[in-house]
Amino acid sequence: MAEQITDTRIPTVIADELHIVYRVNGAKTGKGSATAALSRILKRGEERGVRKVHAVRGVSFIAYRGEAIGLIGSNGSGKSTLLRAIAGLLPAEQGHVYTDGQPSLLGVNAALMNDLTGERNVILGGLAMGMTREDIKARYQDIVEFSGINEKGDFITLPMRTYSSGMAARLRFSIAAAKDHDVLMIDEALATGDRKFQKRSEARIRELRKEAGTVFLVSHNNKSIRDTCDRVLWLERGELRLDGPTDEVLKEYEKFTGK
């Protein structure tokens, strides 16, 4: 009798033949125009003037606790759309997404406000992610130090509109990383800041994995993917082209891109 193999890993995200379709309002375009050239990927909707963009096409995978999964692919391949669907922000046209616990999408859950100070935004972002005021107070100094935004001045007391885009992104990541997550999704957060901050971010992602969470990372930086992730999903034109160990998938992707 053949020995039965049991998978004891705990699933956190299951995508089952997932399709995501955007509906875009737009006027008719003439023959030969730039927009008309997109007709190969756009389908006219049922209503007049509505077009359909099939952004994710039949994607299936299972993510498990303790995994860090990289999402790679060309611009417009569906990576960010897939994360938004997992977070429950986009409805499935077909198929299903199942999640165990609360998914957190970096930059959405930490909904920061430009007219408030960094200090107030730490509190607001923490509350938006489900932390109590006591949790925020206990972790406040660590969040500020991790972000590094006070290294050249007392920026935490200034309005967010005075921050550079990199400073704002570092603060968002620092708020998100202060909480343990069932599923944390990070879209290009490690592309901001200097190498010192990237190293801190990568180390924190590894800690989140050890604490039984699952991390998804979208990045065009293959080195960050190699340093952080043990598995990679490669999307092209909305389809899952390859799913496997990081080195194997990146090797095929680099052949495809010529980089």
Image (spheres, grey):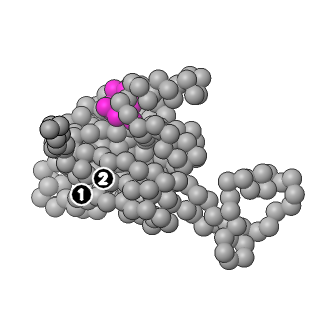
Q: Position of residue 45 (x, y in %)?
A: 66, 70
Q: Which mark is residue 100?
A: 1
Judging depth in this view, the residue of 178 and 51 nearest the camera is 51
Sequence-first disc among 2 and 1: 2
In the displayed structure, 4 sits above or below 49; it is: above
Residue 186 showing in the rendered view = yes
In the displayed structure, 120 sits above or below 242; it is: below
Residue 196 showing in the rendered view = no
Q: Rounded to the nearest whole Å, what is the CA distance between mark 2 and mark 1?
A: 6 Å
Quadrant including the N terminus: top left
The single residue placed furthest to the front in the displayed view is 1
Q: Secondary structure at mark 2?
A: strand
Q: Position of residue 158 (x, y in %)?
A: 36, 50
Q: Are marks 2 and 1 in contact (CB under 8 Å)?
A: yes
Q: Residue at coordinates 39% horizontally, 24% vertically from top-left?
A: 247
Under mark 2, the amino acid is: Val
- Please give the range of residues in magenta: 224-232
The single residue placed furthest to the bottom in the displayed view is 47
Quadrant including the C terminus: top right
Q: Residue at coordinates 61% horizontally, 59% vertically from top-left?
A: 53
